[in-house]
Every structure is written in C-alpha cells, then in structure tokens.
Amino acid sequence: MPRGDTDSVYEEQRQIFQTTQVSPPDMGIGETDGGTKNKQKSTNLAKGMKSRLGFLRRKPDPSDIPAASSPALGKHSRPSCEDAMKWSESFEKLLAHKYGLAAFRAFLKTEFSEENIDFWLACEDFKRSARSTSKLVSKSKKISEEFIAIQSPKEVNLDSSTREVTMANLQKPTVTSLDLAQKRIYGLMERDSYPRFLRSDLYHDLTTVKKPMGAITD
C-alpha cells in the first residue's frame, strides 16, 4: 500500500479512537471533550434530582394554607383567639381540640405529610377497639396495609427496627401493638411539623384579633 494511503487510514483510525475512548477521571490536569460532555450530563441529572427533592421538601406557600374559615377545617366552630393561643403551650393541647386537630391536618396536607396525623388517629381508633378481638384483627390488618408496610399507600416514616417490631406485633394484635410506632410518629410531628404550624399563616390568622369593620385606628 502506498505510504500516503497508509497515513490516511492511520489518521482515520486515530480519529475514531479519540471520539470513542472513555474519558479519564478528573485529576485536575484537564478534560477531553467527551469528559466535559459526560460531566455536564451528570451535573444536569444531579440538578434535576435536586429540583425534584426540593419540591418534596418545599415549605408551603402562604397561598397553599387554607384560611381559618376554609371548608377544609370541617364543621367545627372556630375557636376564640384565646383558645387558639393555648395550642402553642403543647402539642397535646392542639390535638385535644377538635378544630385544632382539623387545622393541623389541613396544614400537614400542604406539606404532603397528612399520613402522619392520619396514622396517629388510626392508632387512637385501634385502641378504642380493645374489647373486640375481631375488630383489633381487622383494624390491625388495615393499618398495616395502609401505613406500615413498605410502599403502602400512606407509608409513614419509621425506622427499620420500629417497623419490624410493629409488623411482628400485628401478627397477634393487642391494644398495645401500635404503641411504639405511634410514639415515633407523634414525636416526629411534635419536633418537626408542630413548630412550623405555629409559625404558619393559618395559625397566625386564628390567633389574631379581628378589628370590627369601620373601627377607628390611632
């Protein structure tokens, strides 16, 4: 083969090799074009994932939070400002008040975490069935399938140990079978969601004294 043809074939093979070779790891020396493209692609994927997670973690926009008179809070009578202010004394007082419970659930819904209060309420209902073994069995199965099992419709955030213990307890349910899991979710809401609820526009609206129409201000 003539030398010119040989050089031409060699040059084509060299160019093909350069365009298909795997980019070396970034050692701070420099990057090939392929390495730059791969790095950009990875960066874009990371940004996309971060954006999705950011949406799930996002704080509720004030427009998402229902007004104190919203139908989302049910048919319970609106409390006085003094009563609503007492909810800030403890998480227990908030949940003990029917309107407070409804308001808190409406708030959790804006944070996509209403499954926590729904689970807590299901546990309370479960304990009220203590006198009926058949009800304990049927309700334990429903709670397990709805809240406890992995990838259940309203799966609550439990550590693996608590989940395993609870699933084992529900094989032969008793009135205390859900106590550990309920305590974990109660603690999560008390530490995390409850303080944010107290800072929300919804709670601020409930604890703000409304001035009469036409009232003269200084």
Image: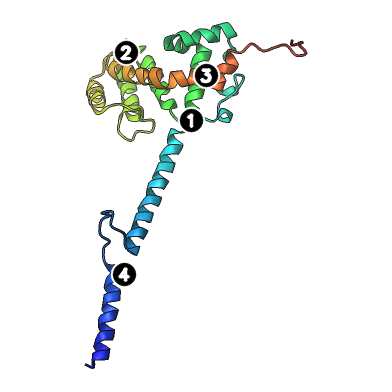
Residue ID for mark 2: 132
In space, the residues marked 2 and 1 are separated at their CA atoms by 42 Å
Residue type at tag 2: Ser
Q: Which of disc 2 and disc 3 is earlier in sequence?
A: 3
In space, the residues marked 2 and 4 are separated at their CA atoms by 73 Å
In space, the residues marked 3 and 2 are separated at their CA atoms by 32 Å
State the SS at label 4: helix
Q: Which of disc 1 and disc 3 is earlier in sequence?
A: 1
What numbered label is drawn on residue 103? 3
Extreme residue in the front direction? 29
Mark 2 vs mark 1: give the one in front. Answer: 1
Mark 3 vs mark 1: give the one in front. Answer: 1
Residue type at tag 1: Lys
State the SS at label 3: helix
Q: Give the image location of residue 210, x and y in percent.
A: 67, 13
Pick the front one: 46 or 110: 46
At a point 43% along the width and 22% down the height, the residue shown is 193
Mark 2 vs mark 4: give the one in front. Answer: 4
Q: Which of disc 1 and disc 4 is earlier in sequence?
A: 4
Residue ID for mark 1: 59
Residue ID for mark 4: 19
Mark 4 vs mark 1: give the one in front. Answer: 4
Rate crowding at label 4 as few (under 14), some (14 to 19) or many (20 or more) other CA atoms within 10 Å. few
Mark 3 vs mark 2: give the one in front. Answer: 3
